[in-house]
Image: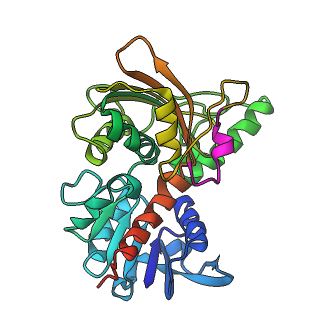
Amino acid sequence: MNIALVGATGNVGRKTLEVLETKKISIDNLYLVASPKSVGKKIKFQGKEIEVYNLENFDFSKVNIAFFAAGGKISEKFAEKAAKYCLVIDNSSFFRMDPDVPLVVPQVNSDDLNNIKKNIIANPNCSTAQLVIALKPLHDLFVIKRIVVSTYQSVSGAGKAPMDELFEQTELVLGGKNINSKNFTKQIAFNAIPHIDVFSDDGYTKEELKMRNETKKILDDKIDLTATCVRLPISVSHSESVNLQFKKSFSLEKVREVLNNFEGCKVIDERADGGYMTPLEAEGKNETFISRIREDKTIDNGLNLWIVSDNLLRGAALNAVEIAETLIKNNFYGK
């Protein structure tokens, strides 16, 4: 199994390398690929230093699977070219709503991997990935009618430069100095910005529409979803306040049971001080954590949840590698 990782020097690329280190995928050759400015850099993997190749002239015929972790513009330009020679697992948003490209969270809709038409598989938005993995077992039992979700997203979801700016702004604020935001629409340090991605004509942002459209594609097109996405001054991990309305009645005991027994989920829900998960505690962990489980007594069959997950890991790198694992387990060898 020969694997290429495009965007190897970025946040998601490096996290993908970390995940590959822990997995049992037998890799014969690993090719790290990035922009021309990163060519010649060396990155450690399994005790060896691997040199970075130039994406502009990389030969994808040498690999079976290529992970793309370099953003939508790179995927738009290079993914379909690569897919002529190998299977592409794309972390960007570019192909997600393409009807000929499966959008996959393996624990939720792995059957969609039976319908690969363009040799490309899309990874969902990180906030969508952690949402659907928690909702899948509940939808199977109680049938979700409507979702209202508010997200509290870390700056790492926007890339390395915004992460660096959060630290810079924090130092400036503590030093009593003025701030000129470069990667955010307003000051992010000690603040909250109710704006992620560009605005659409109806007032929703692209991030909010991604959550709606991707959840419907992955989980069930009949589900109604409305979202508000907020950027917080947090380094890593996204949190979500989720209100659900089911078609069927439920019990809290059954909700906790099915969530705890579903692959990738873990319930941390004690009705006491600190009996819940926070973004800091979720960082570096594979699970999607569910806390604050309680009935919404203002509607029929209503439930409230607090969902937290490491966006770089669970929402991006881990999901992409699990897609590859699922394919290999089912005897996909590429070519």
Name the image quarter holding residue 232: top right
Residue 146 higher or lower than 258, as above or below = above
The residue segment tinted magenta is 276-287
Confirm whether residue 230 shows in the render: no
Is 57 on the left or on the right of 305, as rendered? left
Q: Which percent across, then down, holds residue 106?
A: 39, 58
> Looking at the image, which residue is at 52% across and 23% down?
294
Q: Which percent across, then down, holds residue 12?
A: 53, 60
> Looking at the image, which residue is at 69% across and 82% down?
47
Prevailing SS of the magenta stretch: loop
> Is-magenta flag for residue 284?
yes
> Looking at the image, which residue is at 39% across and 84% down?
63
Is 274 on the left or on the right of 40, as rendered? right
Quadrant that contains the N terminus: bottom left
Residue 257 higher or lower than 103, as above or below = above
Residue 88 higher or lower than 246, as above or below = below
Q: Which percent across, then down, holds residue 149?
A: 42, 29
Name the image quarter holding residue 78: bottom left
